[in-house]
Image (spheres, rainbow, N blue to C red):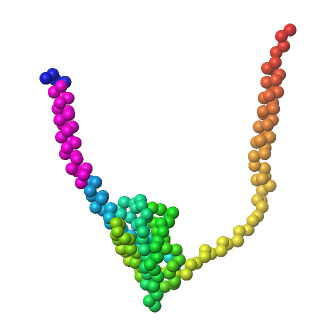
Amino acid sequence: MTGIRKVLAAVFVGLALTLSAAAPAAQAAQAAPAAQADKLKLTVAGDGAQGVTIQATYADGRRLEQVVRLVLTATGPDGQRVGPVQLEPQPEGQGFYSSGPVLSTGTWKVSVNSPAPLQSKATATVQAKAAQSPPAPAPVAVTKPADGGAGTGWWPFAAAGLVLVAAAMGVAMLFGRRRTD
């Protein structure tokens, strides 16, 4: 065998050994996310008014990229019950769900369930409050500027530019034409 053939054979053998050693590790890496894929982490919180928000992610922290059916039930003051209410995904982000105003004012124990294959359950205590409107803006007084020259702005510059263009065209017309007699 020549020297080049020996080097090529050694490279191919090394490549084959590397690929065969990496194959089991790659299969194990693919199996780990698949095992974690059937577990969800549900974070339940109040929306500041009479609703509930839920953030759903995989247990390992990855974003949820598919729609999951979440069902909300709640027990409130004086034994009031709400639900089951099926939650719809919201456009605020992947894995974000909101119930809308379903709770009355008071303290509620909220449970959110996700059926198989991504089975999970989360509970939280939520304080529902009456929806409040933002405060009215303070009136703003409109006044004219004190200096009279502030309104002139760009007009003097535009006029000066037009004068310069006209002068340049006049000069070009005077010197651009030559008579040949």
Q: Residue at x 43, y 84 (%)?
A: 75
The total number of labels drawn is: 0
Q: Position of residue 178 (x, y in %)?
A: 82, 15
Q: Is residue 12 magenta?
A: yes
Residues shaded magenta: 5-28
Up/down of 25 relative to 48, above or below: above
Dividing the picture into quadrants, the one containing residue 180 is top right
Overall secondary structure of the magenta section: helix
Give the residue furthest to the right. Answer: 181
Dividing the picture into quadrants, the one containing residue 122 is bottom left
Q: Position of residue 173 (x, y in %)?
A: 82, 23
| Res. 65 visible in picture | yes
Q: Residue at x 55, y 81 (%)?
A: 130
Up/down of 81 relative to 58, above or below: below
Give the residue furthest to the bottom. Answer: 78
Q: Residue at x 35, y 66 (%)?
A: 118
Q: Quadrant of the N terminus?
A: top left
Q: Position of residue 167 (x, y in %)?
A: 81, 30
